Amino acid sequence: MPALSTQGNLATQWVLSFYSSTRHAVRSFVSLAGKLQGDPSLVSGGGWNEIIQTTSLASKTNGVVPTYSSYLAGASKILMQDYCPGKNVAHGDFLFGGFVYLVAKHA
């Protein structure tokens, strides 16, 4: 299960959309603060929809990636503040934050 952050999410979704032969190699995907709706070419390839089991983690306090752009249609969505209301989870915390790791591990 790859867990990727920021632009790695978009690259993964792009590959899964346009190279269907890669789908068998990935069972599930956890997106950490990814801007998954950032490439218009994905629309034509169905890339704004869940292709494999996907969980998107987002934060109201990200500051870089708006919450609405972190989600794919059909994917599970987890807002960090649902686990800990009032918790400030900035964009960089998705790479190094222990709290993010714990939530992602149980996603």
Image (cartoon, rainbow, N blue to C red):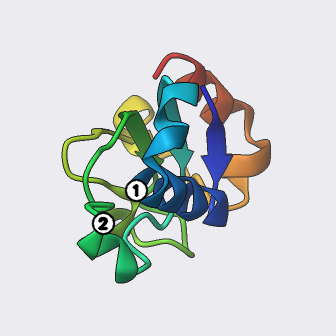
- The numbered mark, 1 or 2, whose residue comes first in the sequence reads 1
Q: What's the CA distance linking mark 1 and mark 2? A: 6 Å
Q: Which label number is shown at residue 67?
A: none
Image position, residue 73 (x, y; %):
20, 51
Determine crowd level at label 2: few under 14, some 14-19, many 20+ residues with C-alpha closer than 10 A.
Answer: some
**Front position in the image: 39 or 79:** 39
- Which percent across, then down, holds residue 41? 37, 80
- Image position, residue 94 (x, y; %): 66, 49
The residue at the point 45 percent across, 41 percent down is 80
Give the structural element (helix, strand or loop) at label 1. Answer: helix
- Locate residue 92, reporting x and y percent: 73, 59
Check disc 1: other Cα within 10 Å, few if <14, some if 14-19, many if 20+.
many
Residue labelled with disc 2: 45
- Name above or below for residue 19 compared with residue 51: below
Q: Is residue 23 visible?
A: yes
**Mark count:** 2
The residue at the far front in this view is: 21
Residue drawn where x is 63% and y is 66% of the image: 7
Q: Is residue 18 above or below residue 93?
A: below
Q: Nearer the viewer, residue 5 or 14?
A: 14
Identified by mark 1, the residue type is: Ser
Q: Quadrant of the N terminus?
A: top right
Q: Residue furthest top?
A: 106
The answer to the question of whether label 1 and label 2 lie on touching residues, with beta carbons closer than 8 A, is yes
Residue type at the position of mark 2? Gly
Q: Is residue 70 left or right of residue 30?
A: left
Residue at 56%, 53% in the rendered image: 12
Residue 85 visible from this viewpoint: no
Q: Nearer the viewer, residue 79 or 69?
A: 69
When asked about the image quadrant of residue 76, the answer is top left
Q: What residue is shown with label 1?
A: 17
Q: Is residue 43 above or below residue 55?
A: below
